[in-house]
Image (cartoon, grey):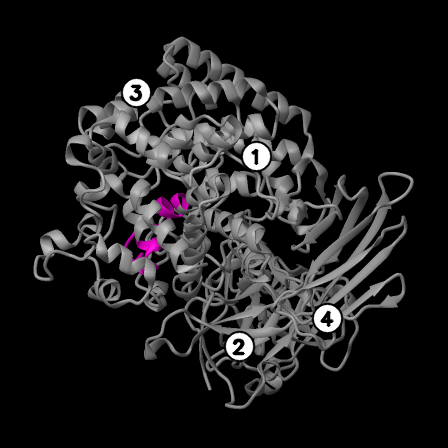
Amino acid sequence: MSVGRMMAFVFAFIAIVLWGCAECKECTNNNAQSHTYRYQILTSTNESWNIISHYKLAPKDDHDHDHDHVLADLLPRKLLKEEHQHDWDVILRKTEKVSVLKPPHQRQDFLREASLHDVRLHEGSIHGRAQQTNLEYLLMLDVDRLLWSFRKTAGLPTPGTPYGGWEDPKIELRGHFVGHYLSASALMWASTHNDILKKKMTAIVANLSICQEKIGTGYLSAFPSEFFDRFEATEHVWAPYYTIHKILAGLLDQHSIAKNPQALNMVKWMVDYFFNRVQNVITKFSISRHYQSLNEETGGMNDVLYKLYSITGDQRHLLLAHLFDKPCFLGLLAVKANDIANFHANTHIPVVVGSQMRYEVTGDPLYKEIGTFFMDIVNSSHTYATGGTSVDEFWSDPKRIGDTLESTDNEESCTTYNMLKVSRHLFRWTKKVSYADYYERALTNGVLSIQRGTEPGVMIYMLPQGRGVSKAKTSLGWGTKFDSFWCCYGTGIESFSKLGDSIYFEEGGKNPTLYIIQYISSFFNWKFGQIIVNQTVVPAVSWDPFLRVTFTFSLAKKTGALSTLNFRLPTWTHKDGAKGVLNNESLSLPTPGKFLSITRKWNAGDKLSLQFPITLRTEAIKDDRSQYASIQAILYGPYLLAGHTTGDWDIKAAPNASIEDWITPIPASYNSHLFYFSQAFANSTYVFTNSKHPLAMQKLPVPGTDLALHATFRVIQGKSSTNFTTLTDAIGKTIMLEPFDHPGMRVIHQGREHPLTVVGSSSGGSSCVFVVVPGLDGQKETISLESKSHDGCFVHSGLHSGRGVKLSCNSSSDATFKQSASFIAKRGISKYDPISFVAKGVNKNFLLEPLLAFRDESYTAYFNIKG
């Protein structure tokens, strides 16, 4: 880009984005501007920074800290005359005269997203299960309960009872989840065409329209309009525009995706109402007052309004969208300042998404630069290995996230949802594999990790990253179906409704072109290319380190058309071992980080097979301080591997050792070796566990918990490779017991009448060997474990005596002894994930599994790895 064009773009930015901020006195959660930032502006050779410096962007006085902490002191003073600060007509005229503003248009060089109506996830795949779990939740929510506060606000009858949590009638943010529900249901209906869901979402839109008609002004919300009186007076109120954004976005999705014409009319009427409110604030006070009010979170108001403008072409919608661009934040990005520390992350990421939409509808390239720079600094300085960002909802200083691991409130889920939008825009504009790689990482680790298995309506707000953390033990823990409705519940139901929206992208032109950027099992009816693509991904496993994907093709018409398909080669793979085979013909593959491009006239029955090596690797935490130099994450392809631990995270690797020397895969057969040992006592079932040292009996735990891990043991059969269906099949065989979450350790006895404990495998000797014998209690389904080194001595639960699990040699005629030495052995409560490894630690070995597989178990997402 030429210097002249850059100057024009920056001037346009100053003229229409920053004009009214000369008198703004705050920027939400922004601490004092750094001296580094001031120095950069004053000394930079960057043309755009020089222009801004020319317009008096320098602080008044380095010693005037009370005033220097506001971005307004770094912004132009007189681009809008003081007497025009309240003149709406002047503002509108100045907006219309800016040359970069154009009617809405579709850029032909942008990739087009594939319609969710044409994409279907494979049932039973990891993404298909996550989508189904979310669909079940959307279907169980009641229309009347969702609408309760809207009807109350409109003065209509309120059948049923309202939901709790953030949708409680006493909560000022009420109504936000309903907006998310409208978006999620539109996305999910497009993804599934579920008829019941369509009836629900159509009923919600119809009843919201009745509420809007009853109020009669265009206003529509679950709280009274007086909230905006407080907002405009800069008095305390909980983010009313945040909720309005969700409602507007939900209704616009109902129009654009679900094809409900009623919804668009409702949106336009709502926007008319808020256009008038903003106009009144500016004419009564000044544009400065309006910008001051934006210090309260407003969600993606600019984003939804730019989208509306792209549909209507109404200049008022464009102006209102622009008035929700947050100049004091976008200004930092415009001058390329990595100075976002202490900003509330999810307040500002949507503003960037909105600025990206401005670029799409107006063609103003400065907004492209803003989005690109923002992604660069977040990804390089503020992002965890999951792809997520923020601690306690805020950004820390650049490359200073090491000490944020001390918090359990890392990576607000909403921020991941919105960062995916940022990266998705950038990929569509640039076709760079790096943005698709980021999307894969954040989707895999930051989105799929927030559901609790396949339990509908159970999600988390924060995704902790530190050592000994648990998803269940953040400040909020797991939510509940009907009494949470946090912001991250809203973005969560949207995320799991659109899992198919970033797999396939189309490119315009004479030759139909398709980009396949995510490897997710799915069907795609590619109408433009006149073919149906069936993508089947073999689930990744640790013992076979390859991603294997097969594409088969069928024709939508009798004859296919010439078209180009582009397949992403992820940067986490390597060329050695990578293969591509089309109809039994080997293909030459490009290097990772590029696309395999195939142009041909596709035929029914064509088959493409891709094989990419999945590499193990470590990744340093984004912190350049020396004390954090050894803190690293472990990844397997796109999967972040977390280690089961309640606190230990120390690993020592030999200086020149490869990662395969200290991380080994767990074989597929090991799941058949897992058992737990139980006894009935006092009308409850107890199991022996290694949760305490020595071993103890505890009540039967539920799966997905630390106690479930502690109650599961791998039965090692000496030199035998026989797999037992039940341990009664192992009568007469010798075995050893390895705790599930302590690989390489063994259960040992310490002599007669002493407790059982756990030691390293090299220390156990004969004390860790037991013989499986028929249950001493004479029951068919029980077994007993006799010490190999102490004949006649058995593992004894101690339940009746209260003395704990021990090796006991009591009289064979004692019925209580026989009961206490007899166990029912069943398949393990916990199981190894197909992607499971053992990492050699300093004090213990670590069982590594994908973060997305964890539920309530304790883990660390980073390790202290010293060479």
Of the residues tagged 2 and 4, which is closer to the observer? 4
> Label 2 amino acid?
Asn
Answer above or below: position of 326 versus 694. above
On the image, which quarter does residue 479 sit in?
Answer: top left
**Relative to residue 40, is residue 368 drawn left or right?**
right
Residue identifier under label 1: 137
Q: Mark 1: few, some, or many residues within 10 Å (few <14, many ≥20)?
A: some
Residue 35's spot in the image, x, y percent? 19, 65
Q: Mark 4: few, some, or many residues within 10 Å (few <14, many ≥20)?
A: few
Please give the count of numbered marks on the rendered protein.
4
Of the residues tagged 2 and 1, which is closer to the observer? 1
Which mark sits nearer the N-terminus, 4 or 1?
1
Query: Mark on residue 544?
Result: 4
| Camera-nearest residue between 782 and 432 | 432
Residue identifier under label 3: 225
Which mark sits nearer the N-terminus, 2 or 1?
1
Q: Distance of mark 2 from mark 4, alpha carbons?
A: 22 Å
Of the residues tagged 3 and 4, which is closer to the observer? 3
> Label 1 amino acid?
Tyr
> Label 4 amino acid?
Asp
Q: Distance of mark 2 from mark 1, alpha carbons?
A: 38 Å
SS of the residue under disc 3: loop
